[in-house]
Image: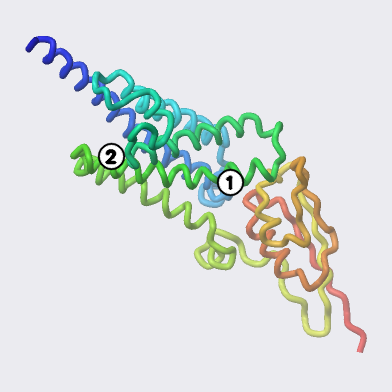
Amino acid sequence: MTVVLAQAATHDDGIRKIAALSARLAYVAMCLTLCWGVLTATGWVRRLTGHHALRTGHAMLAVFTLATGFIHAAAFAFLDDPFFTVLKLIVPLADGGTVRHALGIAGFELMLAIAVTAGLSRSFKYLSWLRFHQLAYVAVGLTVVHSWIGAMANGHLAVVWIAGITVLAPTVTLAILRWLPPHRLIRIGLLDATPVGPPRQGHTLTMRVSVDNQRCRRYGICQSEAPEVFRLQEDGRLQYSRSPDPGLTEQVQAAARACPMRAIQLQGVEQGVDR
Protein backbone atom coordinates (compact mmCIF):
# COMPACT_ATOMS: atom_id res chain seq x y z
CA MET A 1 0.00 0.00 0.00
CA THR A 2 2.82 2.36 0.89
CA VAL A 3 4.57 1.58 -2.39
CA VAL A 4 1.41 2.27 -4.38
CA LEU A 5 0.89 5.61 -2.66
CA ALA A 6 4.54 6.55 -3.23
CA GLN A 7 4.25 5.69 -6.93
CA ALA A 8 1.05 7.72 -7.23
CA ALA A 9 2.70 10.69 -5.53
CA THR A 10 5.72 10.43 -7.85
CA HIS A 11 3.44 10.17 -10.86
CA ASP A 12 1.42 13.24 -9.85
CA ASP A 13 4.64 15.11 -9.04
CA GLY A 14 5.93 14.56 -12.55
CA ILE A 15 2.61 15.57 -14.13
CA ARG A 16 2.48 18.78 -12.10
CA LYS A 17 6.01 19.67 -13.17
CA ILE A 18 5.02 19.22 -16.80
CA ALA A 19 1.95 21.37 -16.20
CA ALA A 20 4.02 24.09 -14.52
CA LEU A 21 6.69 24.15 -17.24
CA SER A 22 4.15 24.22 -20.08
CA ALA A 23 2.23 26.98 -18.28
CA ARG A 24 5.32 29.18 -18.05
CA LEU A 25 6.21 28.58 -21.68
CA ALA A 26 2.63 29.36 -22.74
CA TYR A 27 2.62 32.56 -20.65
CA VAL A 28 5.83 33.89 -22.23
CA ALA A 29 4.76 32.85 -25.74
CA MET A 30 1.36 34.49 -25.25
CA CYS A 31 2.93 37.81 -24.27
CA LEU A 32 5.34 37.64 -27.21
CA THR A 33 2.46 36.83 -29.56
CA LEU A 34 0.52 39.90 -28.51
CA CYS A 35 3.62 42.11 -28.71
CA TRP A 36 4.50 40.87 -32.18
CA GLY A 37 0.89 41.22 -33.31
CA VAL A 38 0.74 44.87 -32.21
CA LEU A 39 4.13 45.68 -33.74
CA THR A 40 3.05 44.04 -37.01
CA ALA A 41 -0.41 45.62 -37.18
CA THR A 42 0.83 49.12 -36.43
CA GLY A 43 3.95 49.02 -38.58
CA TRP A 44 6.07 50.13 -35.60
CA VAL A 45 8.66 47.43 -36.33
CA ARG A 46 9.41 49.10 -39.65
CA ARG A 47 9.56 52.50 -38.01
CA LEU A 48 11.95 51.35 -35.28
CA THR A 49 14.14 48.97 -37.30
CA GLY A 50 13.66 49.92 -40.94
CA HIS A 51 12.37 46.41 -41.73
CA HIS A 52 8.84 45.11 -42.18
CA ALA A 53 7.56 42.68 -39.55
CA LEU A 54 6.69 39.21 -40.78
CA ARG A 55 3.11 38.19 -39.99
CA THR A 56 4.19 34.56 -40.17
CA GLY A 57 6.23 35.16 -37.00
CA HIS A 58 3.04 36.26 -35.21
CA ALA A 59 1.23 33.14 -36.42
CA MET A 60 4.05 30.81 -35.33
CA LEU A 61 4.11 32.34 -31.83
CA ALA A 62 0.33 31.97 -31.61
CA VAL A 63 0.54 28.28 -32.57
CA PHE A 64 3.27 27.68 -29.97
CA THR A 65 1.15 29.44 -27.33
CA LEU A 66 -1.85 27.24 -28.10
CA ALA A 67 0.28 24.08 -28.16
CA THR A 68 1.89 24.70 -24.78
CA GLY A 69 -1.43 25.89 -23.35
CA PHE A 70 -3.05 22.64 -24.48
CA ILE A 71 -0.27 20.58 -22.89
CA HIS A 72 -0.76 22.53 -19.64
CA ALA A 73 -4.51 21.86 -19.59
CA ALA A 74 -4.28 18.25 -20.78
CA ALA A 75 -1.69 17.37 -18.13
CA PHE A 76 -4.29 17.69 -15.37
CA ALA A 77 -6.37 14.93 -16.98
CA PHE A 78 -3.57 12.47 -16.20
CA LEU A 79 -3.45 13.24 -12.49
CA ASP A 80 -4.76 10.68 -10.05
CA ASP A 81 -6.56 13.56 -8.33
CA PRO A 82 -10.32 12.97 -8.93
CA PHE A 83 -10.98 16.73 -8.76
CA PHE A 84 -9.78 17.28 -12.33
CA THR A 85 -12.40 15.69 -14.57
CA VAL A 86 -12.55 16.17 -18.33
CA LEU A 87 -15.72 18.23 -17.91
CA LYS A 88 -13.99 20.62 -15.49
CA LEU A 89 -11.08 21.01 -17.93
CA ILE A 90 -13.38 21.99 -20.80
CA VAL A 91 -16.34 23.86 -19.30
CA PRO A 92 -15.67 26.87 -17.01
CA LEU A 93 -17.15 26.50 -13.51
CA ALA A 94 -18.65 23.10 -14.36
CA ASP A 95 -19.23 20.61 -11.55
CA GLY A 96 -17.79 22.85 -8.82
CA GLY A 97 -14.88 24.22 -10.84
CA THR A 98 -13.00 27.23 -9.44
CA VAL A 99 -12.91 30.78 -10.82
CA ARG A 100 -9.13 30.48 -11.26
CA HIS A 101 -9.48 27.51 -13.58
CA ALA A 102 -12.49 29.08 -15.32
CA LEU A 103 -10.42 32.11 -16.31
CA GLY A 104 -7.75 29.91 -17.85
CA ILE A 105 -10.28 27.75 -19.70
CA ALA A 106 -12.17 30.76 -21.07
CA GLY A 107 -8.96 32.50 -22.13
CA PHE A 108 -7.55 29.42 -23.87
CA GLU A 109 -10.78 28.53 -25.66
CA LEU A 110 -11.23 32.12 -26.84
CA MET A 111 -7.66 32.10 -28.21
CA LEU A 112 -8.37 28.80 -29.95
CA ALA A 113 -11.53 30.19 -31.54
CA ILE A 114 -9.63 33.27 -32.74
CA ALA A 115 -6.90 31.08 -34.24
CA VAL A 116 -9.44 28.94 -36.08
CA THR A 117 -11.30 31.96 -37.49
CA ALA A 118 -7.98 33.54 -38.49
CA GLY A 119 -7.26 30.53 -40.66
CA LEU A 120 -10.76 30.70 -42.12
CA SER A 121 -10.98 34.50 -42.38
CA ARG A 122 -12.05 34.37 -46.02
CA SER A 123 -15.15 32.45 -45.02
CA PHE A 124 -16.36 35.22 -42.70
CA LYS A 125 -17.48 38.78 -43.24
CA TYR A 126 -14.31 40.82 -42.86
CA LEU A 127 -15.54 43.35 -40.32
CA SER A 128 -17.07 40.64 -38.15
CA TRP A 129 -13.82 38.69 -38.26
CA LEU A 130 -11.77 41.81 -37.41
CA ARG A 131 -13.89 42.61 -34.36
CA PHE A 132 -13.74 39.01 -33.18
CA HIS A 133 -9.95 38.90 -33.66
CA GLN A 134 -9.62 41.92 -31.38
CA LEU A 135 -11.04 39.80 -28.54
CA ALA A 136 -7.50 38.40 -28.29
CA TYR A 137 -6.80 41.26 -25.87
CA VAL A 138 -9.58 39.95 -23.62
CA ALA A 139 -8.26 36.38 -23.91
CA VAL A 140 -4.77 37.48 -22.92
CA GLY A 141 -6.15 39.42 -19.96
CA LEU A 142 -8.11 36.41 -18.70
CA THR A 143 -5.11 34.13 -19.05
CA VAL A 144 -2.74 36.53 -17.31
CA VAL A 145 -5.07 36.77 -14.30
CA HIS A 146 -5.36 32.96 -14.29
CA SER A 147 -1.56 32.62 -14.37
CA TRP A 148 -0.91 34.99 -11.50
CA ILE A 149 -3.66 33.57 -9.28
CA GLY A 150 -2.35 30.09 -10.03
CA ALA A 151 1.20 31.11 -9.16
CA MET A 152 0.03 32.46 -5.81
CA ALA A 153 -2.10 29.39 -5.07
CA ASN A 154 0.76 27.00 -5.85
CA GLY A 155 3.44 28.96 -4.00
CA HIS A 156 5.33 29.80 -7.19
CA LEU A 157 4.85 33.57 -7.08
CA ALA A 158 8.49 34.20 -6.18
CA VAL A 159 9.61 32.27 -9.28
CA VAL A 160 7.07 33.83 -11.62
CA TRP A 161 7.39 37.38 -10.31
CA ILE A 162 10.55 38.54 -12.12
CA ALA A 163 10.01 36.65 -15.36
CA GLY A 164 6.28 37.37 -15.35
CA ILE A 165 6.68 41.11 -14.90
CA THR A 166 9.54 41.20 -17.42
CA VAL A 167 7.39 39.95 -20.28
CA LEU A 168 4.11 41.42 -19.04
CA ALA A 169 5.33 45.04 -18.82
CA PRO A 170 6.05 45.49 -22.56
CA THR A 171 2.90 43.53 -23.40
CA VAL A 172 0.67 45.87 -21.40
CA THR A 173 2.54 48.92 -22.70
CA LEU A 174 2.07 47.95 -26.35
CA ALA A 175 -1.57 47.04 -25.78
CA ILE A 176 -2.21 50.50 -24.30
CA LEU A 177 -0.28 52.27 -27.06
CA ARG A 178 -2.26 50.32 -29.67
CA TRP A 179 -5.45 52.12 -28.63
CA LEU A 180 -4.12 55.60 -27.93
CA PRO A 181 -5.47 58.39 -30.18
CA PRO A 182 -3.15 59.48 -33.04
CA HIS A 183 -2.28 62.88 -31.55
CA ARG A 184 -0.76 61.20 -28.49
CA LEU A 185 1.21 58.78 -30.65
CA ILE A 186 2.59 61.71 -32.64
CA ARG A 187 3.88 63.28 -29.42
CA ILE A 188 5.87 60.18 -28.53
CA GLY A 189 7.17 59.73 -32.06
CA LEU A 190 5.30 56.58 -33.07
CA LEU A 191 3.36 58.33 -35.82
CA ASP A 192 4.42 60.94 -38.34
CA ALA A 193 3.21 64.51 -38.21
CA THR A 194 0.39 65.78 -40.38
CA PRO A 195 0.98 64.61 -43.98
CA VAL A 196 -0.62 67.71 -45.49
CA GLY A 197 -0.11 71.07 -43.86
CA PRO A 198 -2.64 73.88 -43.50
CA PRO A 199 -3.26 76.18 -46.47
CA ARG A 200 -1.59 79.55 -46.74
CA GLN A 201 -3.58 82.69 -46.01
CA GLY A 202 -5.88 83.52 -48.88
CA HIS A 203 -5.94 79.97 -50.19
CA THR A 204 -8.16 76.94 -49.76
CA LEU A 205 -6.88 73.39 -49.62
CA THR A 206 -8.40 70.73 -51.87
CA MET A 207 -7.31 67.32 -50.71
CA ARG A 208 -6.82 64.31 -52.97
CA VAL A 209 -6.77 60.86 -51.38
CA SER A 210 -5.26 57.70 -52.82
CA VAL A 211 -4.65 54.28 -51.29
CA ASP A 212 -1.90 51.87 -52.32
CA ASN A 213 -3.76 48.56 -52.56
CA GLN A 214 -0.49 46.63 -52.55
CA ARG A 215 0.37 47.96 -49.09
CA CYS A 216 -3.11 48.18 -47.56
CA ARG A 217 -3.83 45.28 -45.20
CA ARG A 218 -7.39 46.38 -44.36
CA TYR A 219 -6.94 46.76 -40.61
CA GLY A 220 -9.81 49.26 -40.55
CA ILE A 221 -7.94 51.91 -38.56
CA CYS A 222 -8.59 54.53 -41.23
CA GLN A 223 -12.33 53.93 -40.93
CA SER A 224 -12.23 54.50 -37.19
CA GLU A 225 -10.47 57.84 -37.74
CA ALA A 226 -12.49 59.06 -40.75
CA PRO A 227 -15.66 56.97 -41.13
CA GLU A 228 -17.19 59.41 -43.62
CA VAL A 229 -14.25 58.96 -46.00
CA PHE A 230 -13.02 55.38 -45.50
CA ARG A 231 -15.26 52.35 -45.18
CA LEU A 232 -14.40 48.66 -45.16
CA GLN A 233 -16.91 46.56 -47.04
CA GLU A 234 -18.14 43.24 -45.69
CA ASP A 235 -16.02 41.43 -48.29
CA GLY A 236 -12.87 43.18 -47.01
CA ARG A 237 -12.52 45.76 -49.81
CA LEU A 238 -11.75 49.35 -48.83
CA GLN A 239 -14.04 52.01 -50.25
CA TYR A 240 -12.98 55.63 -49.92
CA SER A 241 -13.67 59.11 -51.21
CA ARG A 242 -10.89 60.47 -53.44
CA SER A 243 -11.97 64.09 -52.90
CA PRO A 244 -13.35 64.38 -49.38
CA ASP A 245 -15.15 67.44 -48.07
CA PRO A 246 -12.70 70.14 -46.84
CA GLY A 247 -14.35 69.96 -43.42
CA LEU A 248 -13.05 66.40 -43.04
CA THR A 249 -9.41 67.32 -43.65
CA GLU A 250 -8.28 66.77 -40.06
CA GLN A 251 -9.98 63.38 -39.88
CA VAL A 252 -8.40 62.25 -43.15
CA GLN A 253 -4.98 63.40 -41.98
CA ALA A 254 -5.45 61.46 -38.74
CA ALA A 255 -6.37 58.35 -40.77
CA ALA A 256 -3.24 58.71 -42.90
CA ARG A 257 -1.08 59.09 -39.79
CA ALA A 258 -2.68 56.08 -38.11
CA CYS A 259 -2.39 53.72 -41.10
CA PRO A 260 0.21 51.13 -39.98
CA MET A 261 1.26 50.28 -43.54
CA ARG A 262 1.46 53.93 -44.70
CA ALA A 263 -0.87 52.99 -47.55
CA ILE A 264 -2.78 56.30 -47.60
CA GLN A 265 -1.27 59.12 -49.67
CA LEU A 266 -2.60 62.66 -49.41
CA GLN A 267 -2.00 65.41 -51.89
CA GLY A 268 -3.03 68.96 -51.11
CA VAL A 269 -3.83 71.34 -53.95
CA GLU A 270 -3.97 75.00 -52.90
CA GLN A 271 -6.41 77.24 -54.72
CA GLY A 272 -6.61 81.01 -54.44
CA VAL A 273 -9.70 82.57 -52.88
CA ASP A 274 -11.47 85.25 -54.91
CA ARG A 275 -11.84 88.49 -53.02
**In the image: residue 141, left or right of residue 154:** right
Res. 115 image quadrant: top right
Q: The residue tagged with tag 2: helix, strand or loop?
A: helix
Name the foreground residue: 71 vs 76: 76
Q: Secondary structure at mark 1?
A: helix
Q: Residue at x 24, y 19 (%)?
A: 80
Which residue is located at x 67 percent, y 61 percent? 225
Disc 1 residue crowd, few under 14, some 14–19, many 20+, Cα 10 Å:
some
Say which residue appears at 67% left-offset and 58% top-offset. 224
Q: Position of residue 211 (x, y in %)?
A: 77, 51
Q: Position of residue 32 (x, y in %)?
A: 43, 40
Report whether residue 28 is seen: no
Q: Residue most toward the right? A: 274
Q: Which residue is mark 1?
A: 41
| Residue at numbered disc 2 | 150
Give percent across and percent down for residue 114.
55, 36
